Amino acid sequence: MKISTKGRYGLRALVDLAANAQDSPLALAEIAGRQKISLNYLEQVFGTLRKAGIVRSVKGPSGGYMLGRDAAQITVEEVLRALEGEFSIAPQEPGQEPDLVQRAIQRLVWDRIDEKVNEILTSKSLAALVTEYQGLKQASDNMYYL
Amino acid sequence: MRISTKGIYALEIITDLAMHSGEESLESLKNIAGRRGLSEKYLERIVKGMKESKLVTSVRGAKGGYCLARDASKITVKEVLMAAEGELAPVACLTKETDCGIDCESCPTRGVWGEIWEGILMTADSVSVQDIIDEVRRS
């Protein structure tokens, strides 16, 4: 059971953008450098995020990307849904009628896990991740200077 | 994010085994495979993992077969899925070192992946094989 590469790198890059683009757009090359993600790949990922309205692009010499709205208004759930598609730990195979055992497992296990994961991701905003990230950065900077 | 077919089948197989066996009445893999529509070879591989994790036991010989190693109410979904799938972590870097380019200490997303993992484990730990059997019989 794994989150896809697109989901992992995309969310990481988005937290970087939210933490570092305050009032002016951020060039993807900058995020790529800090997060060690290839620029080519980031361009793809940000294309997807832009279509979902999570980021917007600003054209021009000092152009780049900005969040589509306030980080507090963007949940991790919608970011992952944009990057990964619908979230389900055991998606039902189309065209196959589940039997009694499969239906019981669906209700008791898969539906409950999906609900729990959704609850966690919906209650978490991008702003919360930025706060965590800044705390981590500060802690590791302090370590460095000690 | 999805679980592998191995995990899905493991839960179906142990539920089927639990419903068709007891300490005095062992069940053959052939019968389980027939009911679940799976190949016996594939079933063997999945059951091997559950045997190693001490969720099922087997007796060899003409009257041999399989049954649960303990009461179905004492076997959790978490144990079954871990026997089939390993750690159930949503990203590999939670359980082993991976080369993603940055240090875990400064990773902006490690926290949220950890929370998902915990949520999955907690939920899977709260359901027993007996709960599934009860749900089957209710329907």
Image (tube, grey):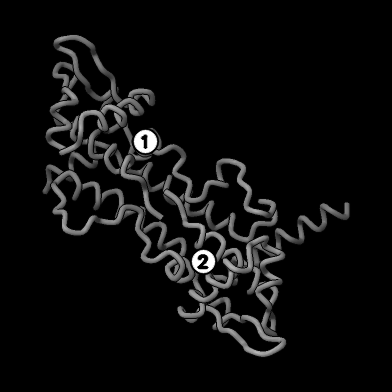
Q: Is residue A21 above or below residue B16?
A: below
Quadrant housing residue B34: top left
Is B111 drawn above or below residue B14 in the view shown? below
Give SS at disc 1.
helix
Marker disc for residue A118: none
The residue type indicated by label 2 comes to Lys
Q: Is residue A99 above or below residue A114?
A: above
Residue B79 in view (yes/no): yes
How packed is label 1: few (under 14 Cα within 10 Å), some, or many (20 or more)? many
Name the residue tied to disc 1.
B84
Left or right of B3, for residue B25: left
- Where disc 2 sits, the SS reads loop
When the figure is inspected, residue B27 is found, relative to residue B137, above or below; the finding is: above
Q: CA distance from mark 2 to mark 1?
A: 30 Å
Q: Find disc 2 in the rendering and name its residue.
A: A124
Tell me the mark number nearer the camera, choosing from 2 and 1.
1
